[in-house]
Each structure stands twice: as structure tokens, then as C-alpha cells.
Image (spheres, rainbow, N blue to C red):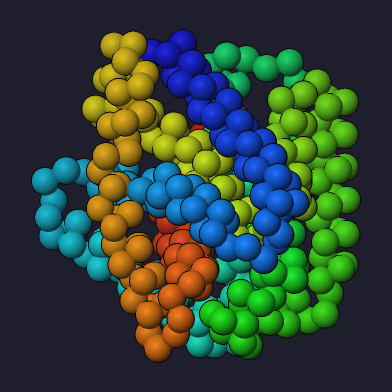
Amino acid sequence: MKENAVKLFRTVRVFSSAAVAISISLSILFSGLLGNHSMGWQVALAIMALAIGIPHGALDHLITLPKNQPKKMAIFVSIYVAVAVVAVIGILNFNTIGFCFVLLMSAVHFGIGDAAFINEIDKRAGSKGKLNRYLYIPAAGFTPVFIPLVNSASTDALAKVNPSLINWHQGLDREILFTVSIFALLALVVLAANKRIRESIDIALLLSLALFTPPLIAFAVYFGCWHAMRHTARLTLSLSRSSQNLSDGKIGKAFINAVIPGLPALVGTFVVAGGLALSGRDFTDEFFWMALVVVWALTVPHMAVTAKLDRAALT
């Protein structure tokens, strides 16, 4: 099983890296041909990326609760949804404090999740040098969250979602861009010096995605093709059916069986986002920003549930 798990993780890693590289290339191409304000190609790419990513968070109950406990399951789901709803309301209606809190939680969650993914590989395949988590986690988490949000296109989108969020950075947008970018570059160099070349490439890809693609693409592709894919690979180690598939050498089936239980969440998320976007407003790219609001909100209970899984992976 150990060798099969490593093979699956490395395959997913190649996929996520390739997806980001292709997205960067397509963004540069289409932006040059159609302009940054053309939303058609951005929406199409965002749909695909979000569709890939959304199901991964819907498996939290499967790794948290034993089977055949419907009462506990109902309580868990009710609390989970309630927390997410409160987070959505906070982002849409209240001041920037709640929004910044959700962003900070998302960045920490993404960085820790990525480090846990790498550590799962290291534990099974070994590594040439120890991963510097103090550099990698902030660089891998803050880069894809904060750099796209200081893009002028994000400002326009936030004005549609909640005008009070336009100045969430309190005029420090350039400082945030500079600080996060420099930290990512520092992490990239140190990781390479410590013979963690693959992780250095990861940071380079995430920084390029954040800097050279429209913010909608940067968020959606990172969430769907990077974070969610890697988290789903980790879930194959915890879900009984997927774990058995790995033991049998059925790597593809192991991954698919980790995705299927989360598919209803895909429908639910787009229904909620559609309802928010259609509530007296134009149905344009706002729908997909609303979908991202839902994704951000779901990160709050999702991070709490996966904390135990992350802690186990990092030890």
C-alpha cells in the first residue's frame, strides 16, 4: 500500500502542477487576444476548476464520525452548515474584520494542508532534506489567497459582493503584494538551497498563478486543481474503500471512491451561489464570486474538522 500511496500522491502532484502551468499559459494567451476584461474564458475555466474542487470538503463527516450513527451525523451536519451560513452572512453583510478573519483561516488551512500532503509523501518515500514548514506553510497558503485579492479586478468584484469589502486592506494593497511576494521568493530560494527542489517549484508555480492570472482564475484553479486534489489524495488513506483500493493496487479507483461521496456538495454549492447571485442582481461573473464566497465560508468548519487529520499527517 505504501508504494501505491506514493504513486497516487505523486500523480496528483503532477496534475496540480500541470493544471496551474496550463492555466497561467492560457491566461496570458487569452488576456493578450481578448483582454483582461473578457469574462467568457475566465468563467469557463473557473467552472471547471470549482467543479473539481468543491466535493473534497463534503467528506468531513466520513472521516470524523463512525458509520451507523444517524443522530450524531445529523447534529454534526447541522452545526457544520450553521457555521458556514454564519460565515457567508459575515462576509456579505458585516465589516472587514470577519472577511479578513476568514481569509486568514483559509490561508493557514491551505498552507498546512499542502505541507501535510508533502509530509505524507516524505514519510513513505523519504526525502533529500527536511521541509522548512515555517517558510513553506505561509508561502503556500498566503500567496494564492492574498496576492489575487489586491488585484484591481478583485476590487471590482468585491464591490458587487459587498461594497464595504473594497478597502479590506486599508490602503495597504501594495505593501501586502510586496510582502507576500518577497516572502514567497525567500521561501523558494531557501527550499532550493535545502535540496527541496520540488517544493521550490511548487512555490514558484503558486506565485506565478497569483501574479499572472486574473484573480477569478487564480482562486478557482488553486482551490480546485491544487488544494482540493491534494486533500482528496490524503483522504484515500482514511476512507476504508479507498484504502482497500490502494492495497489492491487500484490507484485510480481509490481516488474516484474518495470523490464520489462529495458530489452532492457540488450541486448544493452552485445552487446556493446561484440563489445569492440572482437575488436582485445581474447573473454574470458575480455568480462565480458568490461561489467563492461559499467556498471561503465552508473553509471555517472544514478547517476545524480537518485539524486532527493535518496534525496526524505532520507528525
Residue 192, horizontal then vertical, whole percent: 83, 27
Residue 4 vs 213, above or below: the answer is: above
Residue 119 vs 153, above or below: the answer is: above
Is residue 92 rendered to the left or right of residue 18? left
Residue 177, picture quadrant: bottom right
Q: What is the quadrant of the C terminus in the image?
A: top right
Q: What is the quadrant of the N terminus in the image?
A: top left
Residue 65, horizontal then vertical, whole percent: 25, 48
Q: Nearer the viewer, residue 50 or 171?
A: 50
Residue 187, horizontal then vertical, whole percent: 82, 40
| Residue that appears at 82% across and 80% down | 171
Residue 61 vs 95, above or below: the answer is: above
Q: Nearer the viewer, residue 6 or 203?
A: 203
Q: Nearer the viewer, residue 148 or 176?
A: 148
| Residue that appears at 70% across and 34% down | 202
Residue 73, horizontal then vertical, whole percent: 19, 56
Is residue 68 rendered to the left or right of residue 233? left
| Residue that appears at 75% across and 51% down | 32
